[in-house]
Structure formats: C-alpha cells, structure tokens
Amino acid sequence: KFIFDTGFNNFSMDKDLQNFILEHSDEDPARLILSAGKYPGIDVRCAADCISGRNAIRKKLPSWYANPAILYPKSISLEQCSSELTASYKRRFCPEGERVADITGGFGIDSFYLSKTASELIYIERNSELCEVAKENFATLGAVNIKTFCEEVSPDNIKKIFDGRFGLVYADPARR
C-alpha cells in the first residue's frame, strides 16, 4: 500500500521528505528502512517507496524523474505505464483542440501527454490512491486542463461521465 499518512500532506510531498529522498536516492531502500531509527521525523518507509519509484522510472520517464515533487504509486503501476517516448508518440493520434477521455488513467503518463494537444482531458481511474497521486502530479506538472475522476466506467455511469462530445476516448487496460 502506498503510504500517505505521515509523509504527505493532502497528497503533496513534505519538503523535508523530498530532500531526504533526493539525498538518499542512490541508497538501497530496504537498508534505509532498517536504519529508520537514525532519521527521526522522517517517514523512512514512505521515502523508501518513493526512492524505489524514482529508480523504476529513471530511464522510462526522465523528465518526471527530474522533478523531485512527483509522487509514486505501487510499482505495478510504474511497470505498466507508458514511457515518455511512447506517450509522446500516442499524442499524434489526439485531435488538436478536442476533448479527450482517458478511461484507464493509471499513473497518468498518457493523460499528461495527450492533454498537451487536447483542449480538455478527462482522466478516469478506479483506484482511489492512484487517482489522487495522478491528480497531485498533474498539478505539480502544471497540467491545468486535466479533470480527474475516481470511478470505474460502467454502463450505469457512462452517460454521466461522457457528457458532451469527445474527439478521442483512450483506453489502455492493465496488462496483468
């Protein structure tokens, strides 16, 4: 489970935690957890999770890696997300200035890149923690045209979700 209880304030990263993560980014997260007593006031488990997340995306998402304020979900979401190169390529299929819906939002990489072409992007994710992480990351990255919704798309709510016209509805379901 991704930890939000102590290291994050309303899903935004505390500066002390952010600095700790950067200072210890080359260390083994498991060893950091074992030496947590050395770091009073720091949620070392949370820091270790973020260090693991940053290491997992270092080559896949270099611009996100470079931003120390990015939050990270469970590793499965990081493993399954698109790379920056792939997400940027997918942007070619997004109609310029149209509304777009990403109905399988995940970590939000595809949503973020599609939003650069779309007039408005509707990000939909059923996992509440992943949705909150993506929402905070979108704000951190300045993606103001993304609206986040934590729901599962179903026949019962599809009309509520899809109000109006969309130039593209994007779906990239989990591969496991």
Image (tube, rainbow, N blue to C red):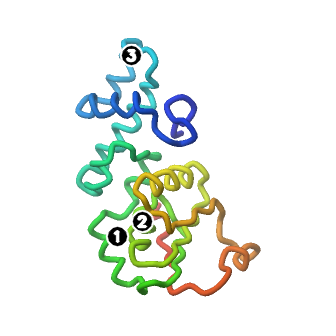
User: Which label sits on residue 87?
Assistant: 1
Mark 3 neighbour density, 10 Å: few (under 14) some (14–19) many (20 or more):
few
In this rendering, the answer to whether 49 lies above or below 92 is above
Of the two numbered discs 2 and 1 on the same chain, state the one appearing first in sequence. Answer: 1
Residue sitting at x 27%, y 34%: 25
In this rendering, the answer to whether 24 lies above or below 40 is below
Quadrant position of residue 11: top right
Taking the image as shown, residue 130 lies to the left or right of residue 81, namely right
Between the residue at mark 2 and the residue at mark 3, the CA separation in whole angstroms equals 35 Å
The answer to whether marks 2 and 1 mark residues whose Cβ atoms lie closer than 8 Å is yes
In this rendering, the answer to whether 67 lies above or below 14 is below
Numbered disc 1: secondary structure: helix
The answer to whether marks 1 and 3 mark residues whose Cβ atoms lie closer than 8 Å is no
Numbered disc 2: secondary structure: helix
In this rendering, the answer to whether 67 lies above or below 166 is above
User: Which label sits on residue 112?
Assistant: 2
Between the residue at mark 2 and the residue at mark 1, the CA separation in whole angstroms equals 8 Å
Of the two numbered discs 1 and 3 on the same chain, state the one appearing first in sequence. Answer: 3
Which residue type does callout 3 highlight? Answer: Tyr
Residue sitting at x 63%, y 59%: 150
Between the residue at mark 1 and the residue at mark 3, the CA separation in whole angstroms equals 38 Å
Which residue type does callout 1 highlight? Answer: Ala
What residue is shown with label 3? Answer: 39
Residue sitting at x 43%, y 86%: 95
Instruction: Please tell me which residue lies in front, 161 or 120.
Output: 120
Quadrant position of residue 158: bottom right
Q: Position of residue 97 (x, y in %)?
A: 45, 84
Quadrant position of residue 55: top left
